[in-house]
Image (cartoon, rainbow, N blue to C red):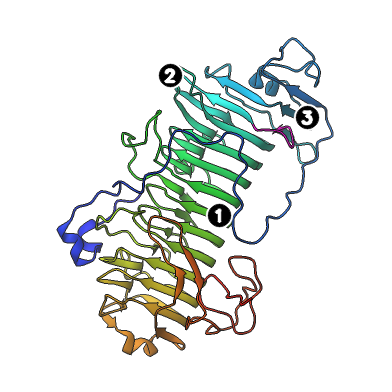
Amino acid sequence: MTTRHWLTRAWPAVLLVLAACQGPATPQPTATVPRTTRPAPTPRAPAEPVPQPPTPGQVFYVAPDGDDAQPGTRTAPWRSPAVAVSRLKAGDTLVLLPGTYPLADYERDILRPPSGQPDAWIVLRGEPGQPYPVLAGRDNLAALVDLSGVQYVWLEHIEMTHDPQAADPRVRDGILVQGQPAAHVVLADLYIHHVDEFGMNLQDVRDLLIVNTRILYAGFGALGGPPGAHHGWEQVTIRDTRLAYSGHYYQGGDGHNRPYDRPDGLGIEPSAGPIVLERVRAEHNYGDGLDSKAQVTVIRDSIVANNTCDGVKLWGREGHLENVLIYGRGDGDATVTPWAGLVIDTTTPGAHFTLTHVTLDDALGHNYLLYVQYDHPQVPVHLTWRNVILSARGPEARIYLAPAVTLDAQAVLFFFPQSLAVGQHGEQVYTCDDLAQLGPGLMCHDPAFVQPAWGQEGDYHLRPSSPARDAGVPTHVDHDLDGHPRDDRPDLGAYEARDE
């Protein structure tokens, strides 16, 4: 993470409080998570079917009561997942039958699949329709699955966690890619939880799809990794996935003793991109919700809620938010901090960032609700805002745009009830009376959310009285966060009202 300039960036009240971004959040369970519960459905557009890979080879089986000397059939399965994986050839499928597979030894137990081919993938999966098979690490194991250097590999319907029955239940990463890049990888319907470092620790990956997956209670963060040795993350799509409670667990405890103080839901180092996040929910992470340093990042149909630090952070040359709801900075901790709902900061001149049908809400105040180019005020950046709601319900809050930022804004509702000013562009400060200078259709009103929240789940649909209803301009976004269609007079924000 880049070092933050606490005192110069924060709103004046922050000068009175030096707060680390690791305060207590709303208590959440850390020890017991149902092992075989499927990912909870999200109230958004339906998931897209995932095409299955070509697998012209054989199907083998492994079971906790199997024997590695057997032929690996369903009636005579192998026992060790790592041994079984080492026997696969391009096009083969390994089915892990339900049960728990303890993994402890670095050389003997980590699953290291071989590469497949474009027309013959390697597939590791749990049995469809059955409980997850559980890969359970112990003895400070480095990772459960190592995909470093592999291509054309598919993992599906597998649970990865620590072994609570072990004397030493530590396990660092769920999935690891370091040293050698991985390419053409699908990770579908995985449940990774209660690991000490990263759910997925990925350095260089290309053509990666993560879909229908949960990563919960990872000590260092759900999705992250070191700076790339090649191009970092390229052509990555994360879809229908939940990233939550990062930092709320570490080595069997609640995470208070973790060595890394800001575990993100997603924390990507400089990368070529693009990174596309669709129908993602990032919540209750002790760091940022989604932090992408990729050159191109697209976030759509997603909720970023109740993270301790920044909600969304973009650093590259291009970023787009569509149908995104961001709220709950601080996650129930009232400590004054300089973190914001949305941060854009890039060293790339001419970078372009768009917000279309975005709802951004903050309850704490004493900060910038969003800021753009604070650390690089002379680097020119272009912003486009359409049909946006900006709500800062706490005191002494505003937005900040650096002098070199160009703003093209239409149909934006500001709600800053405890602040005299709503925005600052360079040295120019704007109140509700000045908004017409920033663009057409900008107004100050209470958006009349159904139930705005802080530290708990909120409802940011619009009440019938909301001035945001039918106040938008047409855009390319033809549906809302729930997947409902928008008309030619769209509502502002992430949701389109539906009167029954």
| Residue in the foreground of this view, choosing between 141 and 33 | 33
Q: Secondary structure at mark 1?
A: strand
Horizontal and vertical percent for residue 205? 58, 43
* Residue ID for mark 3: 92
How far apart are the alpha carbons under marks 1 and 3?
31 Å
* Region rendered in magenta: 124-132
Q: Is residue 147 above or below residue 169?
A: below
Of all residues, the one furthest to the left in this rendering is: 16
Label 2, residues with CA under 10 Å away: few <14, some 14-19, many ≥20: some
What residue do we see at 36% from left, 36% from top? Answer: 255
Q: Position of residue 42 (x, y in %)?
A: 59, 55
Quadrant where the C terminus sits is bottom right
Q: Earlier in the sequence, mark 1 or mark 2?
A: 2
- Picture residue at 57% right of the left edge, 23% below the top: 110
Residue 361 relative to residue 181: left or right: left
Q: Is residue 175 above or below residue 66?
A: below
Compared across the picture, whether 125 is left or right of 352 comes to right
Quadrant of the rendered image containing residue 412: bottom left
Asked whether 464 falls inside the magenta stretch, the response is no
**Number of residues whose C-alpha sits closer than 10 Å to that of mark 1, classed few (under 14), some (14–19) or many (20 or more):** many
The image position of residue 395, as x and y in percent, is: 26, 70
Q: Nearer the viewer, residue 488 or 456?
A: 456
| Residue type of the residue flagged with mark 2 | Asp
Which of discs 1 and 3 lies nearer the camera? The answer is: 1
Residue denoted by label 2? 168
Could you say where residue 192 lies in the image, as x and y percent from the top left?
55, 37
